[in-house]
Amino acid sequence: MSDRDWTLRVTPTEAGVRLELDLADLDGAPVTAAIALDRAEARRFARAMLAAAGDAAERTFPHPPASREE
C-alpha cells in the first residue's frame, strides 16, 4: 500500500488487462476489487475515467471571466 488509502494496479493479460483497486479501509477492513477487461472494454473504461477526471477538474478550478470584445 502507498501513503494514500488506495492503490490501483494494472496488469496486461492475453485478452486485455486486469485492474486491481486496493482500498486500505472500507468499513474497517482492507478490500481489493479486481476487474478483468478485454481490450475494447479497457478502452471504454479508460475513456470514461478520462471524462470523469476532466469533469472533476473543470468543477475544481474556477474559470476566468469571459472578456467582451467591443
Image (spheres, helix red, strand yellow):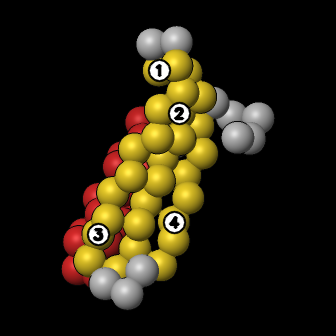
The first of marks 4 and 3 along the sequence is 4
What numbered label is drawn on residue 23?
2
What residue is pinned by disc 1?
26
Q: What residue type is labelled 1?
A: Leu
| Position of residue 11 in the picture relative to residue 58 (left or right) | right
Direction from residue 23 to residue 33 in the image, left or right: left
Q: Looking at the rendered structure, which numbered label has been put on residue 10?
A: 4
Instruction: Kindly indicate whether the residue at mark 2 contacts the one at mark 1 (C-beta within 8 angstroms).
Output: yes
Q: Where is residue 52 in the image (x, y as percent from the top left)?
A: 35, 49
Residue name at image x 33 percent, y 57 percent: 35
Rendered view: 4 above or below 69: above
Could you say which quadrant of the image residue 50 lies in?
bottom left
Element type where label 3 sits in the image: strand
**Image point 40% across, 74% down: which residue?**
17
Name the residue type under label 3.
Leu
Whichever of labels 3 and 1 marks the residue nearer the N terminus, that label is 1
Q: Disc 3, disc 1: CB below 8 Å? A: no
The image shows residue 70, relative to residue 30, as above or below, that is below
The amino acid marked with disc number 2 is: Leu
Q: Quadrant of the N terminus?
A: top right
Q: Disc 4, disc 3: CB below 8 Å?
A: no
At 42% from the left and 80% from the top, the residue drawn is: 13
